Amino acid sequence: MRRPAPGQLGLFEEGPSLPEGFRHQAALITPEEEHGLVGRLAELPFTEFRFGAYLGKRRTVSFGWHYEFGAERLQAAEPFPDFLLPLRDRAAFFAGVPPDDLQHALVTEYGAGAGIGWHRDKAVFGDVLGISLLAPCTFRFRRQEREGWKRASLILEPRSAYLLRGPSRTEWEHSIPAMEALRYSITFRSLRRP
């Protein structure tokens, strides 16, 4: 009997359970839509990601709102460009929320060697919806438990979308290891209601 490749499940094996509140959809957009988006993203005014004195390998640009890490607060940012609005509509439909609830967009460019460490999105944000473009990536989860870290992961394929809500958003951290090839992520967030 042939054995599955490392990291691949056998025919009757169950994968690690993903956090409660996490949803994933393959192929939220078409390859043609991805190609058009990538062309528009390449024109955006990206800046290197800064977290205090730390300079990340990834580059970002925000719309609607910008989170200022040093001051730990939101600041108004440029409005969403028109080309992102249809994608926001589709992401909102996937999440079951009105499009206007998604008031923040963060576009991240991950070049080869860029990743993002373990974190939870800031508490000012509610739902987190991401769309992955170009290279696939491993989306990792971890949660501290009495016995140690509970972990799970899945591959985010190009054009797929994910939603972090409930425990997947508030109890679990997530990260992406260093990329081998260029990847873009478009992340829409709602604002937490006071």
Image (cartoon, rainbow, N blue to C red):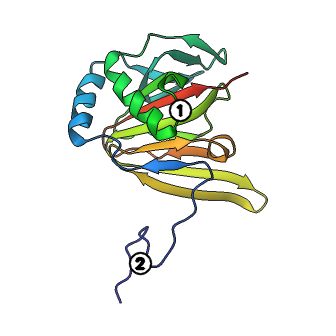
Residue 96 visible from this viewpoint: yes
Residue 138 visible from this viewpoint: no
Judge left or right: residue 25 versus residue 96: left
User: Could you tell me how far apart the alpha carbons at marks 1 and 2 are, in whole angstroms?
Assistant: 36 Å
Provide the residue designation for mark 1: 97
Label 1 crowding class (10 Å Cα cut-off): few <14, some 14-19, many 20+?
A: some
Q: Which amino acid does label 1 sit on?
A: Val
Q: Which residue is drawn at 41% across and 78% down?
A: 11
Residue 65 vertical placement versus 97 (above, below): above
- Which of the two discs, 1 and 2, sits closer to the camera? 1
Q: Which amino acid does label 2 sit on?
A: Leu
Of residues 158 and 24, the one nearer the viewer is 24
Q: Residue at x 22, y 29 (%)?
A: 36
Q: Residue at x 66, y 24 (%)?
A: 124
Q: Is mark 1 on a helix, strand or loop?
A: loop
Return the x and y of residue 38 as percentages of the image width and height: 26, 30
Judge left or right: residue 29 versus residue 161: left
Query: Looking at the rendering, which quadrant does residue 132 occupy?
Result: top left
Of residues 116 and 87, the one nearer the viewer is 87
Q: Is mark 2 on a helix, strand or loop?
A: loop
Provide the residue designation for mark 2: 11
Query: Looking at the rendering, which quadrant does residue 10 occupy?
Result: bottom left
